[in-house]
């Protein structure tokens, strides 16, 4: 199924975040309201063809540059960032498994688990075949390939690559009722005898160091959106002397600084320990960025009133999209997992 031609990771240009912004911003500004539902898919294809998806791989010395690129896309449009992050994460996973990706292929990563038994995996000769349904497939109509997570009846977790253009793949786009992240066109797949390739063997997806590295990459996207919202606050209060609104901006600036510092520290730690499974690092960073984002959303509304929600198309979309994507966090479950892991350590997890 896969091409023998490996995706090459050329060193990114020094101004990759700026290049991404210059590529994306004009297209979003020119799009009509009706076109916004399809512009994310079109832009994703154009970014891939232009080679702007060739981000530095995590843990290879430029992890912060990778996250800066993801944040730059998220600051422009979160639906596009959702698709772009998943595509670049898939390329990193394939690289980690030493599996080449076909040139100009466009990928998704769909590992959310549906109903038990909804997807079945079977062997037929030298092939793996899939039957059943896969839910929560973001961007399915815009992609050429996808990585699917599947837990079998023996509780083994498999990562499977499929080509979406093959017979037996049916997309159903009737489940996504949300206004937020609507442009991801999240769908449900029906699979009938679909050929799949096993990536990395059972347990590979969850056990590899890149699982936690990729989880922090999502937090970088959240941060990019929050950074854009802080910029909206700064612009809105530049000529305003309301002390209460300014206090909200001051609070948002502190939160923004803490989230950015946490991401920078995590990137440095990943590059220093690329083979480590940094679960606590990932959980802590994601939770800190999540809380910063939620408070910045509240501060923005308190400082500027309804205008960011209804007077600016860009900020209105960010405010609709970001809370939906933040719910990819597991909230108190992640907090409890972080606390439990900390209690199992012999030394203090945080010191100056």
Image (cartoon, rainbow, N blue to C red):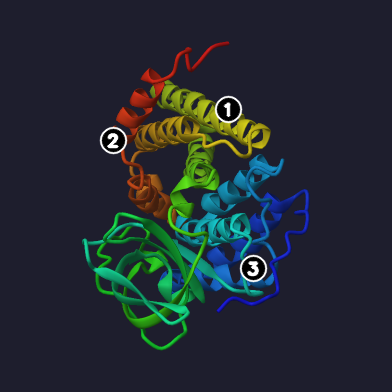
Q: Pick whichever, 1 or 176, lies toward us.
A: 1
Q: Pick whichever, 77 or 142, lies toward us.
A: 142
Q: Residue at x 54, y 12 (%)?
A: 351
Quadrant occupied by the N terminus: bottom right
> Residue 243: x and y, percent?
43, 20
Q: Secondary structure at mark 1?
A: helix
Badge 3: residue crowd in 10 Å (few <14, some 14–19, many ≥20): some
Badge 2: residue crowd in 10 Å (few <14, some 14–19, many ≥20): few
Quadrant occupied by the C terminus: top right
Q: Please name the residue that numbered disc 2 is placed on.
A: 333
> Residue 32: x and y, percent?
47, 71
> Residue 252: x and y, percent?
46, 29
Q: Secondary structure at mark 2?
A: helix
> Residue 326: x and y, percent?
37, 45
Q: Please name the residue that numbered disc 3 is placed on.
A: 100
Q: Which of the two discs, 2 and 3, labels the residue nearer the N terminus?
A: 3
Q: CA distance from mark 2 to mark 3?
A: 35 Å
Q: Which of the two discs, 2 and 1, labels the residue nearer the N terminus?
A: 1
Q: Secondary structure at mark 3?
A: loop
Q: Please name the residue that numbered disc 1 is placed on.
A: 261
């Amino acid at each position: 199924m896969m091409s023998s031609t490996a995706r090459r990771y050329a060193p990114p240009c020094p101004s990759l975040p700026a290049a991404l912004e210059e590529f994306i911003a004009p297209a979003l500004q020119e799009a009509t309201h009706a076109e916004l539902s399809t512009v994310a898919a079109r832009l994703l294809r154009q970014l891939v063809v232009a080679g702007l998806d060739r981000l530095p791989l995590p843990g290879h010395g430029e992890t912060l540059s990778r996250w800066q690129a993801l944040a730059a896309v998220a600051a422009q449009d979160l639906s596009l960032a959702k698709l772009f992050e998943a595509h670049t994460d898939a390329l990193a996973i394939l690289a980690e498994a030493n599996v080449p990706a076909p040139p100009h292929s466009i990928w998704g990563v769909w590992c959310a688990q549906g109903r038990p038994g909804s997807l079945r995996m079977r062997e037929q000769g030298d092939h793996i075949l899939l039957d059943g349904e896969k839910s929560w497939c973001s961007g399915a109509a815009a992609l050429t390939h996808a990585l699917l997570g599947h837990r079998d009846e023996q509780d083994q977790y498999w990562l499977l690559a499929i080509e979406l253009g093959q017979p037996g793949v049916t997309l159903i786009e009737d489940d996504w009722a949300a206004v937020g992240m609507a442009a991801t066109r999240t769908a449900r797949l029906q699979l009938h005898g679909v050929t799949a390739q096993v990536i990395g063997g059972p347990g590979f997806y969850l056990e590899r160091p890149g699982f936690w590295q990729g989880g922090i990459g999502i937090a970088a996207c959240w941060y990019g959106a929050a950074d854009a919202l802080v910029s909206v606050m700064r612009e809105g209060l530049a000529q305003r002397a309301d002390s209460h609104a300014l206090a909200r901006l001051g609070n948002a600036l502190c939160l923004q600084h803490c989230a950015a510092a946490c991401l920078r520290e995590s990137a440095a730690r990943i590059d220093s320990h690329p083979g480590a499974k940094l679960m606590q690092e990932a959980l802590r960073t994601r939770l800190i960025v999540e809380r910063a984002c939620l408070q910045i959303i509240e501060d923005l509304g308190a400082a500027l009133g309804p205008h960011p929600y209804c007077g600016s198309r860009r900020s209105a979309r960010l405010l609709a999209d970001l809370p939906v994507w933040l719910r990819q966090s597991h909230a108190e479950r992640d907090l409890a997992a972080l606390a439990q892991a900390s209690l199992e350590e012999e030394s203090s997890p945080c010191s100056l």
